[in-house]
Amino acid sequence: MLRFVIRRLAWAVPTLFLVTFLVYIALRIGTNPVESYKRINPRATPAKIQQYIDKNGLDPNYVRGYFRWLVNFVTLDWPRSIKGSREVWPQLKDALANTLRLGTAASVVGIFFGLMLGVYAALRPGGRRDVGVNTAAFVGISIPPYVSAILLQLLFAVYWSRWFGSTLFPTSGVYPPGHTGFNLLLMLKHMVLPVTVVAIQIIAVYARYMRSSLLDVLSSEYMRTARSKGISERRVLFKHGLRNALIPVVTIAALDVGSIVGGLIITENIFSYPGMGKYFLSSFGEGDFPLLMPWMVIIVASVLLFNLLADVSYAWLDPRIRLE
Amino acid sequence: MSNELVNSPAVSETAVPVVSPRRMAFNRFVSHKAAVVSVFVLVILVVFVALSPLTARYGVNQSVQAPPNSFLPPRANAWLGTDDIGRDLYSRLIYGVRVSLIIGLFSAIISVLIGCVVGAVAGFRGGRFDDVVMRVTDLFLAFPFLVTLLVMRNMLGAISWLTPIIGKVSSVRFIIVLFSIFGWMGVARIVRGQVLALKEREFIEAARAVGATRRYIVRRHLLPNSIGPIMVALTFSVVSAIIGESTLAFFGYGPQAGDGATSLGILVGQAKGAVNTGFWWLALFPCLTLVTIALSINFIGDALRDATDPRMQKDG
């Protein structure tokens, strides 16, 4: 096991370099950073432009340019953003914190209710409640986040204020415009709708995973063996059924948590939530290379980490899987 | 005496009838009512779309009447209302669904073909090939779907010598290529996982013991036993391509299928602006169509899973 982890970590470091190199190339071809700089700063002097090129490692030679960028990145000598020439880290830090808050809340709510519903459905396969949960999960999966977001906004902002005179939940941002300081209640109120939109998807997905995983386990031979030994039904279910059914679900959950850092783009965009997704869309739209690269590094690192975690947890939970 | 007479027909009925596995699978599929309804819905939809010049009431770019004709609510000469320049939403939906279905089907089929081959080989052979494939998929799946799509889209679009092959950034062909490039990786992971779990099982060991070749084991044992997950993956690929197209269009990066032509995504994208202004039909009908299509295909996928998994028992 330890050997496997070390081997994977040894893989992860070159992977990180390789991926950031590919991202570097993709962004240079796709967004053309030098042109974007000239477009946004039309009066920049040639000296300024050269300084920008040097600091970002935009050498015509991709390999040399990448290493130039890498050295600057690792030594924390990060270039400033193209638009407004602002520090990158403070923006990135805020975006990351906001997204983690939203993502964690939605994941906890979503996975909890999803697992409950999945078990609830699988215990009576084909029964009325199974059909009910299954149908609801299908509807949940089939509704893209922007559709549910639009409907929720329509209900809680447009129509609610039309019927009751005031909106129930705010539909954008973390705080009302102009608010300063920390206010938990206001923050939670702003999070209700985005968390709901994200959680609907998570609930639907996990209810399905849990249901199908538990059904697989319930129809396997060792469940029959367990029953034939005369163990109580309750013990069969919890000790033999649920624990085995959770193995694939845990693995998937690890993967999902890793991808949530950059995976809320649609929801964040619709609710004007200042997280990683909004950060990405605006900087990608501007072709803001200095903002984009650190964002990419964070996304890749988090996913690589949770991928490793998923594999390890899988092998740890299921001794039949051979890692070496 | 009379007892025997009453019992004899019952006995002959309980004699095990000969039912082929395919027939059993079909029976299981049909018992999934939502899936049967979904098949009907999709067939009707496909017929409407295939016969689009007949079923659509107006051309894709044609206005329903002389101005003033913009933002008309649903009425006799425009069943689902009109958009900002007076075009019939019903007709445009039919043309839009056609584009979306083409994108969904083609990219899903290509994704599943590539994914099955790569996943099965990687899972069964293991070793270096497996490592490389899994690292490549790690690499792509490392990014959020939308980010990869947008970055790759810009990059492929900026490489000028590719344009004659995969089409312009805003073309349907380009979108299909784009979705196929990503789609296979999810399928490959699923198939690989299935193969990894199966190859430790006794019947594979038995096959190996009697001298079956690797190729034979993959084709006769591993892939057929993975058919359920593959089917589900196929249906999911179709849905995710259709929803992916809508998502791209929602953010303004979708296909622009020629002069004034449309897609489901473009129509759904208009919904965002239409909500606050109260033109509910522009929001409701495209969203409803999208959800109906996605829901129907998902139901069919679920029924296929039930049908192809012989261990599944409906009565638990």
Image (tube, rainbow, N blue to C red):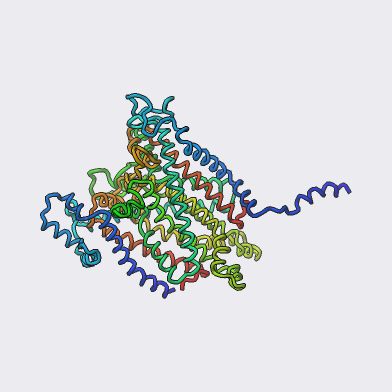
Q: Position of residue B9 (x, y in %)?
A: 80, 48
Q: Position of residue B22 (x, y in %)?
A: 63, 53
Question: Does the image show residue A249?
Answer: no
- On the rendered structure, is A245 left or right of A257? right
- On the rendered structure, is B147 left or right of A141? left
Q: Nearest the camera: A257 or A301?
A: A301
Question: Does the image show residue B312?
Answer: yes
Q: Position of residue B104 (x, y in %)?
A: 44, 47
Q: Nearest the camera: B267 or B65?
A: B65
| Rendered position, B34 above or below A75 | above
Q: In terms of image quadrants, where is residue B76?
A: top left
Q: Position of residue B274 (x, y in %)?
A: 34, 35
| Rendered position, B296 above or below A57 | above
Q: Residue furthest bottom?
A: A3
Q: Residue furthest right?
A: B1
Residue drawn 25% across and 66% down? A63
Image quarter (top left, top right, bottom left or bottom right) of the C terminus of chain B: bottom right
